[in-house]
């Protein structure tokens, strides 16, 4: 946040414009321009002149010299604005930041989030700083920011606002009561945590820059999504998996190991688990980008051993989860003079029948693949 001890020229120009536009006093308008909450929490402060200009000049909601197109109730509503002269600008600035935390949706199709849903999200997210947001003000802030706006075919006062639907769904469910909370955070907007902590009055001094999206490779995820329309167990699994990602029910399975982690979290039916093993087997068998799996280390021990007469040594024993999670993968190293032994084995009857160690790797570098991968 910018220090708010001295108004800049822009603050003063904005205060004059807001005074004239809302019919308030200059000092009250300047007070609003200088509010710490209105200095742009996720980027540059939104200029009051830009807000005023949007109502006149915006392609869809601008009056262009005629009657107002946007009012307090929304698009094509003749409800005129009602300004309180104390918090009206600050609230618009906060709504702007709330919208700014979402990834803008730049495609030209009619996807986006309904302004009425966004208005409710804004109220819940910005409370207690701004507990009531009208449909019209939500649209106004979006227009001033240059977000894509579209009028839905059915008409009415609501517009579609061009922000990520998935991210909005995530935030709406985090804030909502009685809705199923997301179980994974891959659709959490990049500015969410930052804005939340700033509004909670946690001290933040650096400025926020929208992170460049990192395209983390997700070869197993990409492959599984491509199997969605298949008419077999792998296709069914892919359909369920894809719906789970969409609804933030579980994380992404970037590599096959992640699918087993998801399975341990969601406890699938035996049939779904079996379909998962089949899918991993097929992936490893057919995809050049595939890799066999490793599992989580649950116990690791290394201790000194006095030896068997030829000097002391060490014994190492590591225990990893087995793929199904009910047993273990054991890795052992006896480093004792005269007695050196290295071993690995699957200590789970179910996994012992379904998985095998990949050939040609050292004991420490073990990896597993479904038996079906080698067929
Ligand atoms: Zn097992």
Image (tube, rainbow, N blue to C red):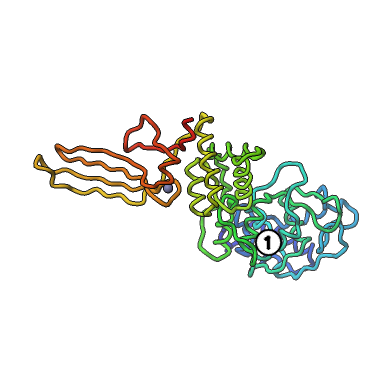
Q: Could you classify mark 1 by the number of other residues whose Cα lies within 10 Å: few (under 14), some (14-19), or many (20 or more)?
A: many
Q: Residue at x 62, y 45 (%)?
A: 242
- Taking 71 as reference, is 97 left or right? left
**Residue under pointer 1:** 121
In the displayed orientation, state which residue is furthest to the left. 309
Q: Residue at x 41, y 45 (%)?
A: 295
Residue 51 appears in the picture as rendered: yes
Instruction: Determine whether the beta carbon of the residue marked 1 sits less than 8 angstroms from the nearest atom of ligand 1.
Output: no
Q: Position of residue 360 (x, y in %)?
A: 36, 29
Confirm whether residue 9 shows in the render.
Answer: no
What percent of the width, then of the height, locates residue 2? 57, 58
Between 236 and 304, which is closer to the camera in this rendering? 236
Q: Callout 1: helix, strand or loop?
A: helix
Q: Is residue 313 left or right of residue 101?
A: left
Q: Position of residue 189 (x, y in %)?
A: 60, 52
Residue 14 lies left or right of residue 350; in this view the side is: right
Identify the image quadrant of residue 85.
bottom right
Q: Quadrant of residue 351?
A: top left
Residue at 67% across / 47% down in the picture?
104
Between 291 and 279, the one nearer to me in the picture: 279
- Count of labels in the image: 1
Which of the two residues, 83 or 240, is positioned nearer the viewer here?
A: 240
Q: In the displayed image of the protein, which residue is found farthest to the right? A: 66
Instruction: Please state, as top left, top right, bottom left or bottom right, where the N terminus lies in the image.
Output: bottom right
| Residue at image location 90% in from the left, 57% down from the top | 67
Q: Position of residue 230 (x, y in %)?
A: 65, 37
């Amino acid at each position: 946040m910018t220090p708010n001890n001295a108004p800049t020229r822009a603050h003063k120009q904005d205060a004059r414009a807001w005074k004239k536009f809302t019919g308030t006093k200059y000092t009250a308008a300047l007070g609003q321009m200088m509010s710490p909450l209105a200095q742009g929490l996720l980027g540059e402060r939104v200029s009051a002149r830009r807000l005023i200009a949007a109502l006149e000049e915006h392609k869809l909601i601008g009056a262009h010299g005629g009657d107002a197109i946007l009012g307090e109730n929304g698009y094509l509503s003749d409800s005129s604005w009602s300004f309180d002269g104390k918090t009206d600008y600050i609230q618009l600035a906060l709504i702007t930041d709330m919208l700014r935390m979402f990834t803008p949706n730049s495609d030209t199709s009619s996807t986006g989030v309904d302004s009425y849903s966004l208005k409710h999200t804004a109220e819940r997210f910005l409370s207690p700083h701004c507990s009531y947001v009208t449909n019209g003000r939500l649209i106004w802030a979006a227009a001033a920011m240059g977000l894509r706006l579209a009028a839905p075919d059915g008409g009415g006062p609501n517009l579609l606002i061009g922000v990520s639907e998935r991210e909005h769904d995530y935030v709406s469910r985090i804030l909502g009561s009685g809705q199923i909370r997301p179980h994974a955070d891959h659709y959490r907007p990049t500015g969410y945590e930052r804005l939340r902590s700033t509004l909670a009055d946690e001290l933040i001094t650096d400025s926020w820059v929208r992170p460049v999206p990192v395209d983390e490779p997700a070869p197993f995820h990409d492959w599984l999504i491509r199997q969605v329309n298949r008419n077999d167990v792998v296709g069914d699994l892919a359909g369920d998996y894809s719906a789970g990602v969409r609804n933030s029910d579980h994380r992404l399975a970037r590599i096959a190991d992640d699918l087993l982690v998801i399975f341990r979290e969601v406890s699938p039916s035996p049939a779904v688990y079996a379909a998962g093993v089949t899918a991993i087997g097929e992936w490893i068998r057919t995809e050049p980008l595939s890799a066999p799996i490793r599992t989580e280390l649950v116990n690791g021990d290394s201790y000194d051993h006095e030896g068997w007469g030829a000097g002391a040594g060490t014994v190492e024993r590591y225990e990893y989860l087995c793929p199904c999670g009910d047993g273990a993968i054991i890795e052992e190293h006896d480093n004792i003079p005269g007695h050196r032994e290295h071993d690995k084995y699957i200590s789970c009857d179910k996994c012992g029948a379904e998985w095998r160690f990949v050939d040609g790797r050292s004991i420490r570098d073990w990896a597993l693949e479904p038996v079906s991968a080698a067929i």
